[in-house]
Image: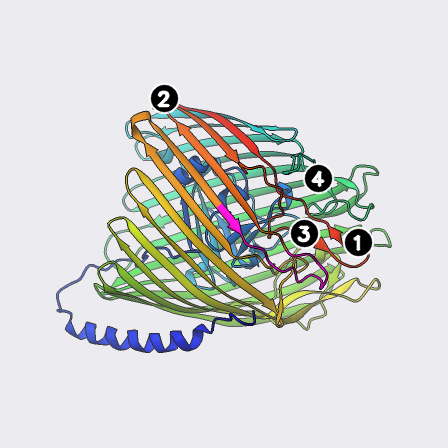
Amino acid sequence: MPGHKFHARQFVAGFSMLVSSLATAQQASVEEDVVDTIVVVGEREPGNVFLGSEDFERMQADTLQDIFSNESSIAVGGGSVAAQKIYVRGFEDVMLNVTFDGAQSPGELYHHQARVQLEPEFIKSIELDAGAGAATNGAGALTGALRATIKDAFDMLEPEQEIGGYLKGTGNFNGDNGQKYTGAAYGRIGESTGLIVGYTWEDRDDYEDGNGDIPGPSSYEHRRGFVKLNGGSDTHAYAVTYENLQDEAISFERPNLINFTGTYEVSDQQMNRDTFALNYDYTPGGDLLDVSTTVYFNSTDFVVQRQNSDIIYGEGDFSSAGFDVRNTSLLGDHTVIYGIDFRDDEVKSAQNATPPFAWGTSKQSASVVGLYVQDNWRISDSFDFSFGLRFDDYDFKGDSGVSEGVSISESGLSPNVSMEWEMFEGFTARVAYAEAFRGVTIREAFFSALYAHDGSLKGEEADNLEFGLAWEKDGYFIRGTVYEQTIENFIDTEFTGPMPVWGYWRNTGTAEVEGYELEAGRETADYYIKFGVWEADNEINGEPLADSNLGLGTNIGRTWLGRLRFNLERFNADVNADLRYVEEEDNPIATDAPPKDQYFVANLYMNWRPTTDLTVSLAVNNLTDEFYYDHATYTWIAGAFNTYVGYPAMGREVVASLAYQF
């Protein structure tokens, strides 16, 4: 980062003092009339993403890369879908709190494999808050929170409709091609209860890159099904969700790498996830009680099995159960959210990646209980102030295997404060500071059977400082954010082996990121145009992050984004384009490594609705058939091999679909 390091702290400290004094002056001038209190949300800054079902329909999203790669400060590794990981401001998604209908999905299964699996067809919304933030983000949200909400029956039914259905077929044309089928049935049960059942089956064969080559095995089969029952009254509301995900892929033992060693065996990879969530809201009226409760269970397992010998390379089961109970009280100009949450995790894993055969097994358990409060204070019509605090108590135990007998307990505080000031109509300034504490917990199933705990670990501590400006008028907008974040006591693996253990979990140092996000455009009923740029400079102990920093992050070149949307109401159609240009970036993985090349990707989408029930869609991804490695992909290895090792991105792909809703 030498030469363009952004020192935000001094600037934000001075700005905070100025804003605080102005707020005090404004508060003194406010009349004592009763003012309606609201929860302060504000416009979402770049990097803080909200995507609704209409967004997924427009972009015809299928993979994580389809969903996120055109959002500020977000990158998704290219190549094999089994290996696609989300990077937020350069940090990997294992730093995020991820929830599905409120059910948490912590940790990861295998560091070479994707952790987050989403089915866009049935997602109602995705929210991503980047950086350590509000106390309501949950325990250990070092780099933010990602929340996915699944559709219910009332999201699919027309106002007077009692029962309905949805059918969709999709063809993907690239390499050995692919197909996807989606169906759902839904309806009302009485006046206020809805039930929806949905299922998706997708089968994809090996893809071609921009040179027309098949880089390695990348075929997969996805099966996803869910049931959601919801209903209630003005006082009571509930939603019960069960989702099952089954992924089967063919790849090498390390799905993010080609067979550069000549020894990686073609393997069958299986991953299954079962998620149960119960959400209940009690709103009796009045200002003091508005209770929301979530109870959940989430279990994910994986197996990597070599095809030539049927030997299991690695396997594991990661389960979590917990609850979150919170109340919202309106106290004058304050909206106060406070509650308690709890999560209990367990992992069972084994690995045969290292000799002697079958020596590495592990069973670990961890829990965290948290108390939190967040106060959103509407000081005046133009000034909002928010502050909050979490207290989290962590407990970790090695129950058997390589970490048997180890016990680590630690607690910590996570405060936050933010201010938002509308200086004049349409122009808003925001400053925020937050800390997040994550105690020792289960990081990964595969590594849990390979690397041992010796009881010396300390919890990780993150701080995040942001300053943002936004201007919006008559559909025009300009928004920008600058930020810096530090993660101290970062926990990673340290090789010492090969025996009696392969290595240990250690606090390996301090990770930092400094960056900015800027976007501008205009939105009308007929079109939406947005252009933006973002850059994140990440380090660990003063050295730039590289692709080898699995579980932490990587370096990504300055990224320019464009999004064009045109509503053609006369033809009941819309035409859309997403544009992404990534600048060349030095590859710090080795001094003689070639730079990560620049690349430009254009994706075009068209949706036509000849009737109210029928939608015809066509997409062309990577329109120019460019050969490139996404910067969020593991690309190069030095030393004896000194070669490209990751999967290049998919070449031109044509996607055609037909959807019927009745």
Q: Is residue 569 left or right of residue 414?
A: left
Which percent across, then down, holds residue 244?
A: 56, 38
Q: Earlier in the sequence, mark 2 or mark 3?
A: 2
In magenta segment, residue 583: yes
For the question of whether residue 185 can be seen, the reply is: yes
Q: Which residues are magenta?
A: 580-595
Along the line of sight, which residue is nearer the eye, 241 or 42? 42
Q: Which mark is residue 641?
A: 1
Q: Which mark is residue 635?
A: 3
Label 1: element kind: loop
Q: Main secondary structure of the magenta part?
A: loop
Q: Which residue is mark 2?
A: 610
Disc 3 packing (10 Å; few <14; some 14–19; many ≥20): many
Which percent across, then down, holds residue 88?
A: 52, 56
Q: Earlier in the sequence, mark 1 or mark 3?
A: 3
Q: Amino acid at mark 1?
A: Phe
Q: Which residue is mark 4?
A: 215
